[in-house]
């Protein structure tokens, strides 16, 4: 239903993903004057430990794997609704290292490109 409304032009989203794996979900938030984008991987898979079990004899979690294939993300953002200039990419998985996010303007749209390679679970742009 939503896709039909978008395609017909009856609903125009503030953010549209135009490239990269759709397993990455984004949430745009404003905290006072700060703009923050949350990137959340919705395609995670739990890997059980082959030998270690809990008290109920169920395998404990060995690791979490990502089923995302393409971490080179691109979004089209309505510039009238959300300003994103100057944001940098941060993740607990990259430690103290932040990453550049590229922005370009195309009429009333901002094109944002973010590379989440090496990030499995979560990142923010702020």
Image (cartoon, rainbow, N blue to C red):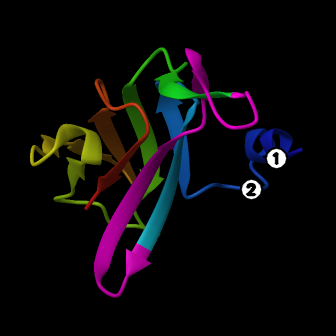
Q: Quadrant of residue 113?
A: top left
The quarter of the picture where the C terminus appears is: bottom left
Q: Which residues lie in the magenta part?
A: 30-58
**Residue at image location 46% in from the left, 24% down from the top:** 20
**Residue at image location 84% in from the left, 40% down from the top:** 4
**Residue at image location 40% in from the left, 34% down from the top:** 74
Give the x, y percent position of residue 12.
66, 55
**Is 36 covered by the magenta stretch?**
yes
> Looking at the image, is 2 positioned above or below residue 66?
below
Q: Which residue is mark 2?
A: 11
Mark 2 and mark 1 in contact? Answer it, CB < 8 Å: yes
Apparent side of residue 5 relative to residue 81 in the rendered image (left or right)? right
Apparent side of residue 78 relative to residue 72 in the rendered image (left or right)? right
> Looking at the image, is 66 positioned above or below residue 95?
above
Give the x, y percent position of residue 61.
55, 30
Q: Main secondary structure of the magenta part?
A: strand
Apparent side of residue 99 relative to residue 124 in the rendered image (left or right)? left
């Amino acid at each position: 239903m939503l896709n039909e409304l978008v395609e017909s032009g009856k609903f125009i989203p503030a953010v549209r993903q135009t490239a990269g794996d759709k397993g990455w979900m984004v949430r745009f938030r404003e905290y006072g004057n700060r703009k923050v984008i949350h990137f959340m991987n919705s395609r995670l898979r739990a890997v059980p430990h082959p030998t270690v079990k809990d008290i109920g004899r169920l395998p404990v979690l060995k690791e979490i794997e990502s089923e995302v294939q393409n971490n080179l993300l691109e979004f089209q953002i309505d510039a009238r609704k959300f300003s994103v200039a100057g944001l940098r990419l941060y993740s607990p998985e990259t430690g103290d290292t932040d990453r550049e996010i590229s922005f370009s303007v195309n009429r009333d749209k901002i094109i944002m490109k973010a590379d989440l390679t090496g990030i499995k679970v979560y990142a923010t742009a702020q």
